[in-house]
Image (spheres, rainbow, N blue to C red):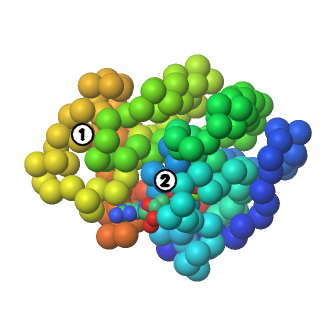
Amino acid sequence: MLDIKFTKSIFRVQDLPTEIIPEVVLCGRSNVGKSTFINSLSKKKNIAKTSSAPGKTRSLNYYLVEEKFHLVDLPGYGYAKVSIAAKQKWQKLINEFLSNSTNISLAFHLIDSRHKPTELDIALNLMLRNFEIPYIVILSKIDKLNQAEKSKSVKRIKEFFPELNFGDNLMLSSSIKNIGKKEVETRLAKLFL
Ligand SMILES: Nc1nc2c(ncn2[C@@H]2O[C@H](COP(=O)(O)OP(=O)(O)OP(=O)(O)O)[C@@H](O)[C@H]2O)c(=O)[nH]1
Ligand SMILES: [Mg+2]
C-alpha cells in the first residue's frame, strides 16, 4: 500500500507542474478502471474520484506518491455520448500533455481485458511510441474472465501490439480482487522508491 495524496487537477497544458517530479501516467478509455486502479494502490480509499457514469474524469489529476513521484490520472476517451468537439479537445489535451511534459517516466495504458482494443487505444499506443514514452499495457477487470478467457485476452492483445511481452510490458489486473497489484507496486518501488 502506498501513501498517495491528491495534489491538483489541471485542464490546460499551461498549468503543467513546474517542479521536476517523475510522472507515471494512467491512460485508457473511459470506464476502463484508471481511477479505481489508483485507489487500489492507496492506503486511503477513495482518493481518486470514480464513477459508474463514464466520462467522469475531465481533468488531468495529479497524485503524489510517497512524496517521490506523481501518478497522473488522464481523462478517459471513447465514451459514445461525448460530442465530437469534446473528443477533439481530449485528443488535443492528451497530445499536448504527452509532448510537453518532460517529467513522464512511464505510462500505464489500461485496456479492458474483455474487449479488443479500440481505434483510440491504437491511436494512444501510437502516441506513446511516437513520444518514446516507456509503457506497460494493463489488461483490466480480469476478475470478469475465466482462465480460458484470460489466455484469449492475452493472445488477442499481442496480435494488436506485438511488442508486448507478458510479465514485462504486459500485465493483468483486477482492482477489485487485487490481482496484479503486487507486481505494479514492485515495479514502481524499483523505479522511484
Ligand atoms: N469488475 C471490476 N470492475 C472494476 C475494476 N476496476 C474498476 N471497475 C469498475 O469500473 C467502473 C469505472 O471505473 P473508473 O475507475 O471510474 O474508470 P476510469 O477509467 O477512471 O473512467 P473515466 O474517469 O471515465 O476515464 C466503476 O464502476 C468501477 O467500480 C476491476 O478491476 N474489476
Ligand atoms: Mg477516472
Horizontally, residue 54 falls left or right of residue 64, namely left
Q: Amino acid at mark 1?
A: Val
Residue wearing tag 1: 154
Q: Is residue 66 above or below residue 162?
A: below
Horizontally, residue 59 falls left or right of residue 162, namely right
Q: Mark 2 vs ligand 1: CB under 8 Å? A: yes
Residue 133 place in picture, x, y as percent: 58, 31
Q: Quadrant of residue 111?
A: top left
Other residues around mark 2 within 10 Å, as few (<14) / some (14–19) / many (≥20): many
Residue 34 place in picture, x, y as percent: 52, 55
Residue 107 seen in this snapshot: no
**What's the residue at 70%, 62% (across, down)?**
64
**What's the residue at 34%, 31% (across, down)?**
164
- Tally of numbered tags: 2
- Tell me the distance, in whole angstroms, between the alpha carbons under discs 1 and 2: 20 Å
Q: Quadrant of residue 156?
A: top left
Instruction: Give 144 or 167, whichever is nearer the viewer.
Output: 144
Residue wearing tag 2: 31
Q: Quadrant of the C terminus?
A: bottom right
Q: Is residue 53 above or below residue 32?
A: below
Q: Amino acid at mark 2?
A: Asn
Secondary structure under tag 2 reads loop
Instruction: Give 79 or 57, whichever is nearer the viewer.
Output: 79
Q: Residue furthest top?
A: 130
Secondary structure under tag 1 reads helix
